[in-house]
Amino acid sequence: MGQPSYSVEIHKVDLSFGSVEVLKDLTLSIHEGEFLVLLGSSGCGKSTLLNCIAGLLDVSDGQIFIKGRNVTWEEPSHRGIGMVFQSYALYPQMSVEGNLSFGLKNAGMPKAEIEKRVARAAEILQIEPLLKRKPAALSGGQRQRVAIGRALVRDVDVFLFDEPLSNLDAKLRADLRVEIKRLHQTLKNTMIYVTHDQVEAMTLADRIAIMKGGAVQQLGSPDEIYNRPQNKYVADFIGSPSMNFVEGTLNGSGMRVTDHTIPMNGYAYSTKHSGETPSWIGIRPEQVVTGEAAKAAPFSTTVEVELVEPMGSDKLVWGQFAGMPFRFRMDGQATVLPGEVMPLGFDPAVASLFDRATEQRI
């Protein structure tokens, strides 16, 4: 532990509130300059883990290292971190400039250095025209920029973001997401970012740690997590709309689903299987092809259209395959009507197989 090549290391961390275990034997290493996203649904422990790294919560067991230094019991102010919360937490009576400089003044920093840091943060975040305004005269996006600026002026090694965009409307969220990505590319600091929004996670992260029940389910790049989910929970959580799951039995000849046999030629198995294995095959809606392309696919069938959701650039079509709900995407300009029977197909080599007993990838 404590290798300087890692920016942050979490080693066998436990955290309990009374008899409730929130984090369980959690180990995670974050590289220098990496943008790591902690992703999961409410109550999975992601914000708790961030607060442990920040020093706002004391761990029950385990150790936390920042830049090779054991900071497990150090005060938050000594850990070399800057934190941005969901709530902006700005001082309403101070100007933007006052909010940015307040912590530095308290630390006794020279006035010239404070001015230099505030000017640099304002330039990076494009809030220079707002420096004399008070928070009440700012929009939500501008306030969140100021909150990020307050962390930025501290010139720290590690930035921690706790759902910073969840209070903003969809358009502002998308705009600020781009700003945060640009900020990381400019600064190249380590950033750890908590969200329940998979779009934020996929677009921002170098690596994503998907959490459930206080443990990391999978750690990998957005592509790895999207294309090779390690278990059914990850597969279901990532992707919008989520993956289709069809029950069947895996055997030597392929995947038997009711009266269909899906050939699994070309599928890269993660684990050995033998005999008959009750399984799920998972197919993403965008992996499904229709029309003439379906007839040429390694596996094809027909589906009766039940529901059509126009989404502008594409349409989401609902039907049933083997008695289970099945969704697929079509071009937004395609004409498709409920009741229509249409051919669809997919390549099983790009699908995902999961053991029904363990829910782990096969």
Image (tube, rainbow, N blue to C red):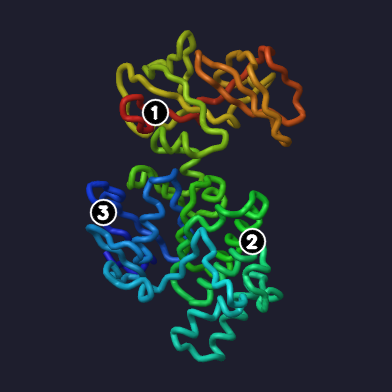
Q: Which mark is residue 354?
A: 1
For the N terminus, give its image quadrant.
bottom left
Q: Local crowd at mark 1 within 10 Å, few (<14), some, or many (≥20)? A: many
Q: Local crowd at mark 2 within 10 Å, few (<14), some, or many (≥20)? A: some
Residue 254 lies, in percent from the top left, at 43, 18
Q: Is residue 295 visible?
A: no
Question: CB of mark 1 within 8 Å of CB of mark 2?
Answer: no
Q: Which mark is residue 241?
A: none
Q: Which mark is residue 14?
A: 3
Q: Is residue 214 above or below residue 243?
A: below
Q: Residue at x 43, y 14 (%)?
A: 256
Query: Which residue is nearer to you in this view: 43 or 276?
Result: 43
Q: Is residue 151 visible?
A: yes
Residue 88 lies, in percent from the top left, at 54, 64
Depth-wise, is mark 3 or mark 2 nearer the camera?
2
- Secondary structure under badge 1? strand
N-terminal of the pair, mark 3 or mark 2, is 3
Question: CB of mark 3 within 8 Å of CB of mark 2?
Answer: no
- Secondary structure under badge 3? strand
N-terminal of the pair, mark 1 or mark 2, is 2
- Secondary structure under badge 2? helix
For the C terminus, give its image quadrant.
top left
